[in-house]
Amino acid sequence: MNYLTIDDAAAWASRFTKKKVTSSNISYLIQYGRIKKHSKSGTTVVSQEELKQYYTSYMNDLQSKFTEKLGEDINWSLAFHKVKEKETTKHVHRLHPYKGKFIPQLVEYFLDQHTDGFKKEVFFQPGDIVLDPFCGSGTTLVQANELGIHSIGIDVSVFNCLMTKTKLAEYNLRSVSEWAKRIEQAIVKQSTMSKVDEFDSRLNDFISSLNKEHFPSPDYKYNLAQGLINEEDYVPEVMAQVNDQYEKLLQEYNFEVHGEVTQSSFEAQRGVTQSAFLNTWFADNVLQEALAAKDVLEDMPSEEEKELLMLILSRTLRSCRTTPHYELERLNTPVSGPYYCYKHMKVCRPVLSMLRMYRRYAKDTIKRLKEFNELRTAGCFSVLAGDAREIDIFSEVSKNNQGLFRLLKDKKIQGIFTSPPYLGQLNYHEQHQYAYEFFGLKSHEDLEIGIADQGKGLQARKDYIEGVSDVLLNCSRFLADDCPYFCRSQ
Ligand SMILES: C[S@@+](CC[C@H](N)C(=O)[O-])C[C@H]1O[C@@H](n2cnc3c(N)ncnc32)[C@H](O)[C@@H]1O
């Protein structure tokens, strides 16, 4: 058998898959039990044969899955499936999770100046104005800016508009860092007061020792992947012991994950409407820390900086909901104690303090904004919160960007690039419910086209077609003659 070091395995896999594979990708495969770790003279190595088997089945799976669903007529070069996640979530594209996002490389492909066998003409020039009437998290606007194209985005969800604006706004990053630090201090103060830090570190020690004993990595994952352990029998047995010990720890500290505190008047003082959602999906302590952080926001003089800090807090809250990691995308049942995590294949636990996540996201946000600053052009942008079926683009742009308004009046919009909602699949407000409820944002869920709750039946499809057509008709009033429309279809 031929063995390769991690670096050699990465180089071999890159040649084999014709896609950049890094050493950390190989380590991930070992960590998640996809391939076995071996040792040769003290150096970690993997089997080339096993690596080949893994990548062959991975690539076949992907292609056959899509061919089965969509038929043979697929332009694979536009699937961008070989673009690494790091690239599809580059710089500001990862400021906050959002379900239903464009791959930025796809947007770039159509907006930029290149032509090829498929794209036979250039559609946009620097200085043009592009419109995305369903702008979501702002991918079109960010990519347009990178290319020197002005942009207008519309979305019915105010939270999505906030996400888009914060990605494009230019900040005084020194001031942002100072406010981020003040918020951190408020969280630290609250968590020290509640003694959650002490409880948390005892819980950490307990969970890491039991993971070492019952779910050692990577051996446990490898044994699972090879079918040598039956997860269904093994896990409940171990979890019974875990829950027992967790109860004892709670009693020792007289600690409650979901107690009475969230119900107190303390919430009303900070302008957060008491809500069953917040009480159900957050540990008391996390909610109290978030409220302490929100107090600091109230003192911020700059509305733009405040919105950015709201976004960081929202991203933090999302990760701190009392849900298993593997259900972060779609909430199911709240958890208030340790649980077996099917994603990490070990025991994980709910987040009882937001401090660690907040620090990580605050740092990451500033880093990403700096990265985008290096690419930013003078392209103007305007983000309009409203129903794209009836919004008056000229009048709304005139209220928030006079420079862009003058251009708009002069040359109108040169093209639409958009991705309409997925019929009957998502609820774009609900996916950020934590932010709507915590910040008291106004929901316009009733205006969402194709919302999941309406299903995919005949009536839903009729309404959807009418809705999207109305958007295009409304927007056509503001378009220059003969301009292109790019609409991702269902
Ligand atoms: C598929 S997503 C767009 C995602 C976007 N391309 C991105 O990369 O983030 C569709 C968006 O349409 C928005 N939407 C739904 N109904 C709308 C309406 N009546 N007017 C404006 N936007 C609407 C949703 O809120 C959602 O953000």
Image (cartoon, rainbow, N blue to C red):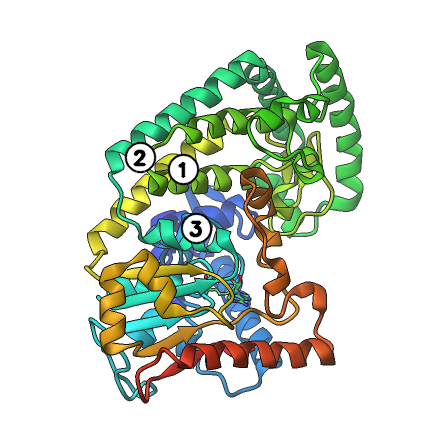
Badge 1: few (under 14), some or many (20 or more) residues near its Cα, within 10 Å? many
Q: Is residue 182 above or below residue 59?
A: above
Residue type marked 1: Leu
Q: Are marks 3 and 2 in contact (CB under 8 Å)?
A: no
Disc 3 Cβ-to-ligand 1 distance below 8 Å: no
Q: Are marks 2 and 1 in contact (CB under 8 Å)?
A: yes
Residue 156 at x, y percent in the picture? 52, 61
Q: Nearer the viewer, residue 62 or 251?
A: 251
What residue is pinned by disc 3?
162
What residue is pinned by disc 1?
309
**Disc 2 to disc 1, how far (Cα)?**
8 Å
Work out which residue is located at the far top of the displayed protein and give it. Answer: 252
What residue is pinned by disc 2?
176
Q: Is residue 483 left or right of residue 327?
A: left
Residue 241 at x, y percent in the picture? 77, 26
Q: Earlier in the sequence, mark 3 or mark 2?
A: 3
**Disc 3 to disc 1, how far (Cα)?**
11 Å
- Residue at x-position 39% and y-position 74%: 417
Label 2 secondary element: helix
Q: Earlier in the sequence, mark 2 or mark 1?
A: 2
Residue type marked 2: Val
Label 3 secondary element: helix
Residue type marked 3: Leu
Q: Nearer the viewer, residue 123 or 339?
A: 123
Badge 3: few (under 14), some or many (20 or more) residues near its Cα, within 10 Å? many
Q: Is residue 305 left or right of residue 122?
A: right
Query: Residue 394: in sight, yes or no?
Result: yes
Q: Is residue 443 left or right of residue 228?
A: left
Q: Is residue 97 above or below residue 135?
A: above
